[in-house]
Each structure stands twice: as structure tokens, then as C-alpha cells.
Amino acid sequence: MGSKLTQSNRAGWAFALPGFGLIALFIIVPFFFAFALSLTDQRLISPNPTQYVGLENYRNLLGLAVITLEPERDESGGIVRDEDGALQYPRVRSITRSDEYSQYAGMREWFRWQSGDNARVVVASDVIFMKALVNTLTFVIVVAPVQGGLALVLALLINQRLRGINVFRTVFFMPVVVSIVVVSLLWRFIYDGNDGLLNNLLSGLTFGLFKPVDWIGNPDTALGSIIAMSIWQAVGFHMVIWLAGLQTISPTLYEAAAIEGASKWQTFRYVTWPGLRNTAVLVLIVITMQSFALFAQIDVMTNGGPLDSTQTLVFQAVERGYGKQDISGGSTISVILFLLVLTISLIQRYLTRERN
Amino acid sequence: MATISRDNRGLRLAVRYLVLVLVALVFAFPLVFMIVSSLKPTAQLLSDTSSLRAFLPVGDISLSNYTAAFQRAPIGRFVLNSVFVTVVTVTASLFLCSLAAFSFTYLKWRGNGLLLSIALATLIVPFETIAIPLLLFVSRLPWLGLDGIEYGWLNTYRVQIIPWIADALTIFLFVQYFKDLPRELIEAARAEGASWWQIYRRVVMPLSGPVLATAAILKSLKMYNEQYLWPLIVVQDEAHRPIMVGLGYFFQLNVAWGEVMAYLSVITLPVLAFYLVLQRAFIASIASTGVKG
């Protein structure tokens, strides 16, 4: 075989190998490691040999069940009510800890709802993971369209022919060159419940009508506050990508639309938007991937709190894989995260495919 | 009628500018607040938030927060670490990724197309999904040091540099750029008997200013601004800690906000200055990640 190698073959390999080798070693190998490790009980440092455990890690994360609780009854079969008239139910613990129902062993209540006289309780093997999963999906589902849409609005604003428009472009883009870690710490102060800048600004603008909110200390507002801040920081990035897309649209199309007497909306709908198709797909996929990776904001601002309302998948993967040195648990979350990213990108590609 | 329509146009223009100015305020106010506050004592900083004084350098203005912040944490060391890691990684990345892209674009060899596809496929693997297995991997990797072979890369510069050198986006940017260079130049050089290395060095690289600038800006931002999760889990000792992880010094309960603002300004102002001077190149580099994507 050696004699068959031409000069080009040898040089080709020699030039490509250092770069490709590093990608293989530090991206592709750990990527496959993640799958392998998720099937073991690997720890960062451990005196015991690593063992194959099959899908146990996945069961420990994804285990879900619905338990139906019947209200407590007295000896004659009547339903017991407390002083406020509320129904009484047996404790969930009495089921998840009983030997009779071993399939629920180790599960805890996630949430419940009422169904007639019965209560239905969703129990999960790992309630914190479930909250992290829901929060991450919420973040992605809100941020992807809102950030993408706002970025397009900004791009259209900047694409006007006005004197000094470049100054505005410079300002809109500024937060992008500021680290998200810096932004998170800065906004911790802006969101502060007592001396926070935002509360003071809002109460000043409404002449004192606005009641101060502890933005990131309140489980109802924490995730929303982090969403708003993240969009503020990153929207300029996608504005620039939209702007590049806008500038590829031929001016003759706009002239033709003007001659036809198209309204502004019609021009946007039939000239601008079709010209931005590829850009739209790219922007959507890039924001989605970045949103799934939500970590620094959480680590700096809330540590997943209050009441786990800002837990995310990456934060949990790091807390277990690094904080608790549970490499296999962290790897399992990583694999689930990757499969989610892959599925959603494929769905997005399918929905935005070229239709003939 | 004529005067009315002119007034109308003036009004519309005024509304357009008003919208632009309001949006600009939304983007600028936190950063103005950060820089202005870094010059105020913490007590004044807190009381100023209830008025527009929050955005004005008024009152007791000094650099004492900066002195105090530098005393509380070895900030100088953290800055040096970040700058060192950034410069080495970016330099190595430009060299190795352009070399690989050169080979993928111009040279014929077995496996060329396959390897390029595999490399580009890694674009859909977010770093966050490999961080934990990579942590285990680097904690056991060997390294040939001055004292022979040692195991484990934790708490070093190399763990912050080597995994970050090669990436699919940088290779992709170079491949896109090289494809558009005139092939005749390379064929002519080949006909004159130039080696591939000479063509890379003497023909292609001197023409690659724009793509080098783009790749350098994107990679520098990534290394200086965005390195947080990885150094957090692989660097525990102060001597190698980069600047974003060093912020942890200021996370305690009784936050000295004046000092925090000073530290944040120290981190941010150099990058902002670079951006303001080179903004065309910054914006062009972001835009180029979207073209043809």
C-alpha cells in the first residue's frame, strides 16, 4: 500500500491530521465516552472497579408514574374532611415506601391534580431532574422564537437608510462582546429585590405605583428574569446574522415591488421574508442549540433556586458529574441532553424544509 | 398642503429616531451603570440607584474600588492567565485549522471527504454535552513533562488550551474562504514546482487576511469571554485560574458591589475598546458565520 501513496496523499494526511486529530480526541472520543459511561457506575475517583449497570442510570432519571389516591374514609365508609372541608388523602410516602408497591420504590411526588374525589399524583424517580428538564425546555421554547423575532425587528430597524444608523448598530451589538458571566453578575444587582436598579426604574417610571419584586429570589419570576437577561445579551448577535441575510436580497426585487404598488407589509411578506428563509433556519437552530446549553447564568445568579425553579439540564449534569463526582450520572444527563438537541434540530429542519 | 406633508415627514423621522434611541438606551443602560458605579463608594452606589444619578459619574468619584478589588483577589494573575490561554489557543487554532482546511480544499487524498464530513458533524455536539466525560478523560491523560511521563491534566494551562485548539466552525470558515480563491494561482504554483507547504505559506496565507481576522475574533471572544464551565471543573488552583472563574471571589453574601463593578469593568473594558476600534471586523466576522450556513 505504501508505494501507492502519492505525494498528495501524504501531504493531505499530514496537513489535515493535527487539526482533525484534536477534534477526534477531544470531541468525538468524549462524545462516545458519554454513551458508554452512562451504562456504568463510573466515578471521578473511586477505589472500587467500575461496573456495567445497563440502563439503571436512565431509569433513575426518567422513572415516572401516576398514583391515584383515594380519600380517607371513616369506618362507616364516609369521606373524612378536615375543618376547612378539604379531603384527606394518605401520604404519598406510605405508598412509595411500602413493600407492597415496590415498583414505586424511591420515587417522590412531583405534582398532583384533583380528579373527582381522587387525587392523582405524579411521582418521579428524580424530581429535580424532571424540573431541570421542564425548565430547560421552557427556556428553549420561549427564547428561540422571541430572541429570533426581536433580532429580526432590530435588523429591520438598523437596515433603514438614516444618518448615524451605524451608531445604533454599534450600541445594539455591544452586549454581545460582554461575557455572559459578567452580564449575569451585573444583572444580579439590577434584579435585586431591595436596592435593585430595575425596581427603582420601574417605580420611578410609574410614579411609585410599581411594587418592588425580588426578581430572581421569587420562584414565579426567576426563570423569566433569566430569560429576559439572556435575550438582552445575545439578541445583537442574531441581529447581525439577519442583517447579513437582508443584504443578500436584490434591490431590484424591492424596486419591482414598489412599481407594483405593494404596501410595506406586502413587501415584507412577499419579498423580504422569502429571501430570508435560509437565514431563518440557521438562526432558529443556532439559538436552540445555545439555549439548551444554559449554565453560566444559573451558576452565577441562582444555583438552580429558588425551590429548583431555575434548575437546568447542564447545571444538573455539572452538579452531579463534577460536584458529586458522579461521572456516570452526569454523562447520562449529557446523553439525554444531546438526544434532545438532535431531535429538536431534526424536527426544525423537517418543518422548515424546502417545499416544492 | 406642501408644508403639511413636509411636517409629516419630519415627524416620521423624529419618531424613527425616538424608537432607535429608546432601544439603544435599553442596550446601553446596564453597561453605563456598571462603569459609572465602579467609580463610586458602595454606599453611594446603592443610594444613587433611586435616581438618574445611577448613570452619572457624580458625587464621591475615585478609583478606590479598583485598588480594593485588586487587593481582595489576585486579579492581575487571572487576567494574565486568560490572556495567555487566549493568545496561545487562538494562534494554534488559526495555524492548525487553516492547514487542515487547506488540505481538505485543495489536496486529493483518500478519506478527504469522509474526514471533513465527520469534522463538520461535530458542529451539532454542544460542548456542554461532552464536558463531563471529557473531565474524566483529561483527569487520566498522560503528559510527557520534564520529569518523565505524568498522568492527569487537571490544574494546568494545557487542559485549558489543547482541547480548544481545533473546532469545526473555524475549519468550516477557512474551507468556505479557500473555495472562493482562484484555483489558477495554486495550479500555477504547482506547475512551477512549489511544494504544498510553500503554496500554503507563500500563496494562500498571504491572501487570507479577512478569514484570519474573522476566525481570530470569534475564537478570541470564545476563549476570553465564554470560558467558564470548563475551567470551573478542571482548574481548582488559583495559579492557573482564568478571569471569569476568578469572579467567584465576589460571590459572598455581603457583596461589596463597588468592587464587583470595578472587577467587571476591568474584564469588560478592554474587549469593549477592541470592539469599538475594530467594529467593522467584529460585525463582519459574526455575519460570516451566517452566510451559506
Image: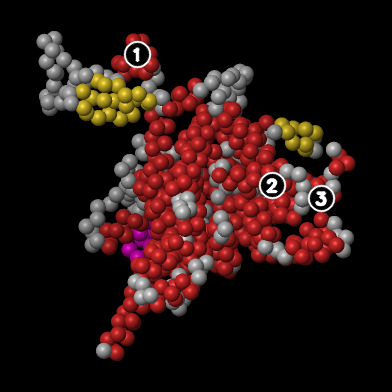
Picture coordinates of residue B8 (x, y %)? 30, 82
Extreme-bottom residue of the structure: B2
- B110 or B76: which is nearer to us? B110
What is the quadrant of residue B95 in the picture?
A: bottom right
Q: Is residue B163 left or right of residue B233?
A: right
The residue type indicated by label 2 comes to: Gly
Q: Is residue B153 above or below residue A213?
A: above
Give the residue pinned by disc 1.
Answer: A101
Based on the picture, tell me whether residue B50 belongs to the magenta stretch: yes
Of badges 1 and 3, the one in the foreground is: 3
The residue type indicated by label 1 comes to: Tyr
Output the chain of dot 3. Answer: A
Picture coordinates of residue A128 (x, y %)? 40, 31
Same chain check for tags 1 and 3:
yes
Which structural element holds mark 3? helix
Same chain check for tags 1 and 2:
no
The residue type indicated by label 3 comes to: Ser
Mark 1, other Cα within 10 Å: few <14 / some 14–19 / many ≥20: few
Picture coordinates of residue B231 (x, y %)? 59, 42
Residue at image position (47%, 35%) is A316
Residue at image position (46%, 54%) is A356
- Quarter of the picture containing the N terminus of chain A is top right
Q: How is the image coloured?
A: secondary structure
Q: Tell me, yes or no, whether the two marked residues, 1 and 3, touch with CB atoms within 8 Å.
A: no
What are the residue bounds of the magenta stretch?
B43-54
Which structural element holds mark 2? helix
Output the chain of dot 1. Answer: A
Q: Earlier in the sequence, mark 1 or mark 3?
A: 3
Output the chain of dot 2. Answer: B
Give the residue pinned by disc 3.
Answer: A8
